[in-house]
Amino acid sequence: MDWTALKLSLELGFLTVLALLPIGVLVGRWLAHSHFSGRDVVEAIIALPLVLPPTVFGYYLLVSFGQASPLGQFWQAMTGRPLVFTFEGLLIASIIFNLPFAIQPMQRSFEAIAPEIREAAACCGMGWWETLRRIDLPLAWPGILTAMVLSFAHTLGEFGIVLMVGGSIPGETKTIAISIYDRVQAFDDASAWTMSLVLLAVSLVTIALTYAASRRIGRRLG
Amino acid sequence: MPPPGASVAGWGEIMQGLAIRLAQESPIPLDVTLSCRPGELLALVGPSGSGKSTILRSIAGLYRPQTAHIVCDGEIWADSTTGRDVPTRLRRIGLVPQSYALFPHLTARENVLAAIREEPAVDADRRADEFLALVNLKGLEGRRPAELSGGQQQRVAVARALARNPRVLLLDEPFSAVDKMTRGRLYQELAGLRTKLAMPVILVTHDLDEALMLADTLCLLHRGSILQTGAPLEVLQRPATVEAARLVGQRNIFPARVAGHDPDKGITRLDWRERPLEVRLQSRWKPGADIAWLIPPSKVILHRRDRQSRGEAENPVQGTITSLIALGDTIISAVKLDRAERRELTFHVPRHVAERNRVALGEHVGLSLLAEAIHLMPAAEPRGRRS
C-alpha cells in the first residue's frame, strides 16, 4: 500500500476542487444566464477534455507547460521551479482537465433556476453578489456539490494526463492511479488490489454522500 | 393624461405617479402612451399577444423596447433619447408575476425580508411580519412556498412586492393561477388593500370582469396599441371602435346610416337596412354617415306574449330563436331577425321570463332595442391607427 501516493492523490483532489469551485460557479453561472454569439464555441472548448484522448490532451499540456513554452518560462521565472513533472504543474493540468466536470453540472443547475426567480430577486433590489449569495447558490447547491464530487473522483482516477505531465515522481507527481499501474507492472498484485479497493471505497462513499445530500436538499425545496 | 406623442422628459417635474411612452416595430409591436396617478388602479386589458405583459415588464426594466420613456414620481427610469436606463433593482417596483416567483428555499417571512432594504435586522423582521399580516397570512410566516396553497402563495408575493416600498405596484395576471373561489376572496382583499396604498397600481389581465371589479381606469390593448382608455364601464358599454367593441365582447354590432337628429326629443334616427331605428342622441355623427351601432345583450327586451306593453313601441324587431344557452339564472339566446339582416341578435333574458313566455328554439318572438343603450361607432376603423 503506497500511502504517499494516496495522500498525494487526496491533496491533488482537494486542491483541484477548491480551485474549481469559484471557477465553476462563475463560469457556469455566466454561461447559464448570458446569451452571446460565441457561446457554443466557449462551451465546446470547455467540453473538450470529455472527448479528447487523455494522452493527446496530456501531450498538449506537456508541450505548453514545457521549459520551451512561454507559460513554462513564465512559471520558472516566477517560482524558480519548472511546471512539468512537478506537483504544481499537475495541479494546473488537473484543474484544466476537470473543467467540464465542474462547470457543466453547475451550469445546468443555474439554468434550472426559473428566470422569473432571478427577475424577482432584481425586483427585490438585489444586486449581482446578493442574488448569487441569497438565491442562486442555495438553489443550485445540489449541482455544485455534484460538480465538486465528480471533479474529485475524476482527479483520483485520472491516469493518462497525469503520466504525461507529471511522470511518476514519488511524493511529487506519483498519484495513486499511477502507483496502482506501477504495482501491477511489478507483479505486486496484493498492493494493487488493496489500493484499487481503497480507491473504489473512496469513490463509492463520496458519490453516495452526494446523492444523499442532493436528495435532502431536493426534499427541502419540495 | 399627457397628449399622445408628447415627450415624457418634460413631465418629470410635474408628474406624480407613473408616465410612460413605449414604441417599437418588432419583435413585439408596441405603441403606447399612458399614465397612472398615485392610488389609481389601471388595468391593461387585451387578448394574449396584445403586449400588456410587455408593457409591465418594460416598466420593471425587465424588457427594453427600442423607444422607451418611463418617468415615475419625477424620476426618469428610462429615456431612450439619452440612453438612460435605470436597472430593475434600483427602480423600486413591486412586481407580482403570474407565477408569483417566490424563492422556493425561503420561508414566507424570508421571502418578504428579501425585499426589505436598508433597515436594521430587528426592525426588518417585524416589518416582514407586518406585511404578512396585512395580506392575512399571520401564523404562516415560517412556511416555505411549497407548504402554502396557491392563494397563500399569491398573498406572499403581494406582501413581498409591498415590502419593497414600491413607487409603483405591478400585478401581472395575479389571479390566473388560483381557483375561482380563492379568486373571489383575493379580489376582495385587493380591493381592501387598495385603500391603504398610495402608489399607482397597474394590473395586467385578460379578464374584463376582473378589470371591471378592480380598476379605476381600463386601458384596452390590441397588437401593442391602445384602442381605448377610460372608466371600465364606459369602455365596456361605449367602445370607441368596432374593434374595441369586439374585444370587450360586444356581439350585437350592426352597420347602419345616420338619418338625422332630433335634439328636442333627444334622439338620433338611424336607417338600419331600411328599418328605422331611434337611439340616444349622439349628434357628433353627420346625417348620411355610415356608422356601426351596438346594443348590449341585456338591453334587448323580450316582448310579453300574454299582453302588450307600452315599451314595445321602442325599436321593435321580430325574429326566430336559433339558439338558447342557460347560464345560471340567465338564458343567452340568439335570434335570426326577419328581413335581410344576416347577423344574429343576441339577448339575455332571466330564466323565469323565458319560461313564462315559452321561449324555445324556432319560436317567433318580438324584441325591443332600448334606444338609451344603443351606442354609435365609426363604421370601420383601420387597424392600429391610434397611438
Image (spheres, helix red, strand yellow):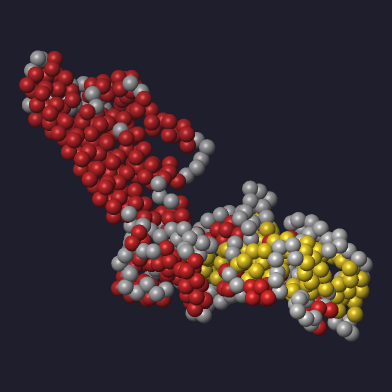
**Image point (63%, 58%), residue name:** B47
The answer to whether residue B373 shows anywhere in this view is no
Q: Nearer the viewer, residue B199 or B149?
A: B149
For the N terminus of chain B, the image quarter is bottom right
**In the orientation shown, which residue stands out farthest toward the bottom?**
B264
- Is B382 positioned to the left or the right of B125 in the image? right
**Image point (16%, 19%), residue name:** A181
**Image point (51%, 62%), residue name:** B176
- Vertical position of residue B292 compared to residue A176: above or below: below
For the C terminus of chain B, the image quarter is bottom right
The answer to whether residue A179 shows anywhere in this view is yes
**Image point (57%, 63%), residue name:** B204
- Vertical position of residue B202 compared to residue A211: above or below: below
Which image quadrant for residue B382?
Answer: bottom right
Q: How many marks?
A: 0
- Is B36 positioned to the left or the right of A79 in the image? right
x, y percentage for residue B169? 52, 68
Q: Nearer the viewer, residue A22 or B65?
A: B65
- Is A31 positioned to the left or the right of B309 in the image? left
